[in-house]
Image: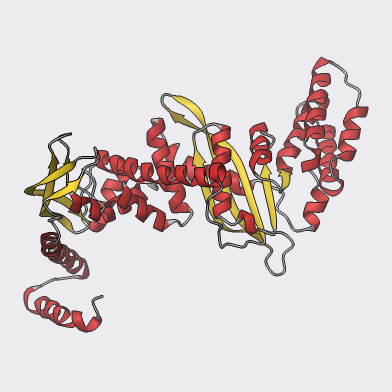
Amino acid sequence: MITQTDMNPLLSAAAEFARSQMNCGDITEAEDAVTEITRAMAAAMMQTLATQFCGQREYDGAHIGCDCGKRARYRGLRGKDFQTLHGIVRVKRGYYRCDHCKRTSFPWDGRQGLSSHMWTPRVKELVASVSSTLPYEQTSLLLARTSGLSIEESCAEQIVAEVGGALRREDAGDIVKAVDTGTMEISTCKPKRLYIAMDAVKAHTDGEWHDVKVGVIYEGVIPEGKATDTLRNPRYIAAQETSEAFGRRVYTKAIQRGYDNAVERVVIGDGAEWIWNEANNHLNPAIKIIDYYHACEHIYGLARVLYGEGDKNGGRWAASQCKKLRNEGPGSFITALRRRKAQNKQQTEALRLQLGYFTKYRKYMKYPSYDARGMMIGSGPVESACKIVVGQRLKQAGMRWTREGSDSVLAVRTALLSGELARIERASRAA
């Protein structure tokens, strides 16, 4: 580790250079000049260091093992340019070729986390993180402006594909451990109350609109002086995949977030059947809650059929039923539906559908009990996640995605928003 004492001679030389060589008229001119000089110095230092440690470790012996099972022979040194955070450096490193499968390998590259492309792990980490937040064009412009890093839009997209792909491969391995083999290491997290919420949002991929499933896992903590939980430490999940696959993914993330150690587990969602199928498949035991506001939408929708659009009596009836649902639970509303006399076929069908809905999910509508315990009863966090994770990145004006491209962005974006920076760093080396 370089200490302040080690840097003092360099800092003194820099200060003297500024006094004797740099004649700047204002602060902006000075900033531009210092930026240009520091970037040039960083590039020179990076080239020197790369040459030094590459030269020390470019030889791995006369032969190394090849993936085909044979032995690859050392053939000499081969040069290549790599894009670092501090400019392009050129290094010469040993390469090996297998006479059997004709494959060429560079052991030094693998140790450095370098792929067949020219970007270092730090470059990939930075570009992938920014690209998961901004469109590729803006990423290219911003990085060039702020860091001097020149990355074409197509290269930024390729980097996201590499890093996102590595993250998804890591996820796949974790899912096997958590769901199939039961070998996932138990989390050290011990949340008092852990919430798991799921929903879906449309995104345009491969020329059509498809559901992207979204989940958020978070702790619920009641602040001092408050009566209801607030969200803490959210972890985000998003993927365009089947309900079954997403259920496995959510369960795995819940295990990593401390599901096994949680004092209470709460699942929140709207009335989408796939949510409750997967919750019952993977998230037991848990308290399951139908989003109260979604249930109220059903009541108001029924009121429009029974009373007519915009009828004040219908609005008062719906408001009264929603209040009873919150204070008493669904029992009185179900009774009211059974007693209600339909005036036409449309009302008959609407009453039938809502009676079925509230009867099916009544066990998830114990709102007085949830309120008494300070639990959240709304799916606001996951609805917000749909906007933050998917809407703000995949659904900007004119955006069209391939399924693979959107999935790579979602993999990086969810890791970034979840604060999983170490995972992005690891994936940047593995990509």
Q: Residue furthest bottom?
A: 5
Quarter of the view holding residue 373: bottom right
- Residue 99: x and y, percent? 12, 36
- For residue 28, above or below residue 136: below
Q: Residue at x 10, y 73 (%)?
A: 22
- Residue 159: x and y, percent? 29, 44
Is the N terminus in the top left, top right, bottom left or bottom right quadrant? bottom left
Q: Is residue 116 shown to the viewer in this render?
A: yes
Q: Residue at x 60, y 49 (%)?
A: 381
Q: Is residue 220 left or right of residue 57?
A: right
Q: Residue at x 45, y 44 (%)?
A: 173
Q: Is residue 198 left or right of residue 263?
A: left
- Residue 225: x and y, percent? 72, 69
Of 355 and 430, the residue lying toward us: 430
Q: Residue furthest right?
A: 339
Of 319 and 180, the residue lying toward us: 180
Q: Residue furthest front?
A: 70
Q: How many marks?
A: 0
- Residue 188: x and y, percent? 56, 63
Q: Is residue 388 shown to the viewer in this render?
A: no
The colour scheme used here is secondary structure
Quarter of the view holding residue 213: top right
Quarter of the view holding residue 401: top left
